[in-house]
Every structure is written in structure tokens, then in C-alpha cells.
Image (cartoon, rainbow, N blue to C red):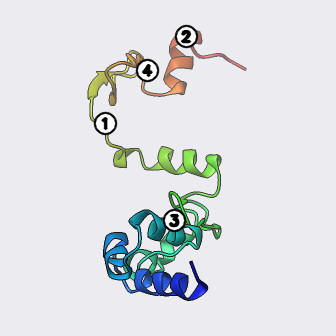
């Protein structure tokens, strides 16, 4: 395949054409078109539009280095990811979630049915297990 044919494939892909449309137009294999587009990291315009939030960590705002292929990063580290989800627990979706009562404080919390948690948080567990210690 010549350099000119590769450039034509990339140009058509940037214009928004699918792999199949490009293959039919240029009369080449769809898999050839797909491999060339993936090799050069070429995606249609509507996919690659810049989103200000997608290039920064959701917690600390640090600039993220995104790869051309694969899933886009939302967090700069596991620590930021865990901290953000701990602050935004209401946004998680518990498909098999059940309501449970904390054995210590009586508060109702959501959990997965398989977990069978007894306490809503670590503090309640420590308080129920060891009681209050006077220092």
C-alpha cells in the first residue's frame, strides 16, 4: 500500500466515515482500513473533540496524558480514584444493592447483598469491637 492510499484512508476517517464505508469506497479490506486507522490513532471528529474535564483528574485537576487507543483516564492515580468515589458514593450504581442496618449506630446504608456487611463504616466497627478507650 502506498503512502498516498494511507493518507486517503486517514483523511476519510477524520471526515467521519466508518471502516466499512472507506473499504467499499477504496475497494480494500475493512480490516486493512481498521489496522491503518488504529496504527496512526485516527478517529472521527465527533470522537476526538476536546473536553476540558476529560484531560484533568476528577479529584485533583492534574493534567492527564491520554493514550490514542483504549479507555480514557479519569484519574491520575488509584489514590485519587478511591478518594473521589468515597466522596461521591451516591453516584455509584448498586444493581443488586440492599438496605442494611448498622449494628452499632443503627444507620441504614446500601451494600451489595453478597457482602453481608454489619457496619456502615470502619469507625462503627472499631467502636462495636473494642468500645471507647480512654487515653
For numbered disc 1, what is the local secondary structure?
Answer: loop
Nearer to us in this view, 78 or 132? 78
Residue at x-position 56% and y-position 77%: 1
Is label 2 in contact with label 4 (beta carbons under 8 Å)? Answer: no
For numbered disc 3, what is the local secondary structure?
Answer: helix
Residue at x-position 41% and y-position 78%: 44
Query: Disc 1 or disc 2, which is closer to the eye?
Result: 1
* Mark nearer the N terminus (2 vs 4): 4
Q: Which residue is mark 4?
A: 119
Q: Residues within 10 Å of mark 4 (few under 14, many from 20)?
A: many
Residue at x-position 58% and y-position 68%: 39
Answer left or right for 75 relative to 11.
right
* Mark nearer the N terminus (1 vs 4): 1
Nearer to us in this view, 98 or 132? 98
* Mark nearer the N terminus (1 vs 2): 1
| Marks 1/2: CA–CA distance | 28 Å
Query: Disc 2 or disc 3, which is closer to the eye?
Result: 3
| Marks 3/4: CA–CA distance | 51 Å
Query: Disc 3 or disc 4, which is closer to the eye?
Result: 3
Task: Give how far across and how far down residue 98 sits, in percent.
Answer: 26, 26
Amino acid at each position: 500500500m502506498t503512502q498516498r492510499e494511507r493518507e486517503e484512508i486517514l483523511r476519510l476517517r477524520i471526515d467521519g466515515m466508518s471502516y466499512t464505508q472507506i473499504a467499499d469506497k477504496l475497494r480494500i479490506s475493512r480490516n486493512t482500513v481498521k489496522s491503518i486507522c488504529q496504527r496512526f490513532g485516527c478517529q472521527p471528529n465527533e470522537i476526538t473533540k476536546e473536553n476540558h474535564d476529560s484531560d484533568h483528574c476528577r479529584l485533583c485537576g492534574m493534567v492527564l496524558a491520554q493514550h490514542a487507543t483504549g479507555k480514557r483516564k479519569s484519574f491520575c492515580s488509584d489514590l485519587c480514584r478511591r478518594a473521589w468515589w468515597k466522596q461521591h458514593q451516591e453516584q455509584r450504581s448498586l444493581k443488586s444493592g440492599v438496605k442494611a442496618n448498622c449494628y452499632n449506630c443503627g444507620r441504614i446504608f446500601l451494600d451489595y447483598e453478597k457482602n453481608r456487611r454489619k457496619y456502615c463504616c470502619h469507625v462503627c466497627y472499631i467502636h462495636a469491637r473494642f468500645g471507647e478507650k480512654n487515653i
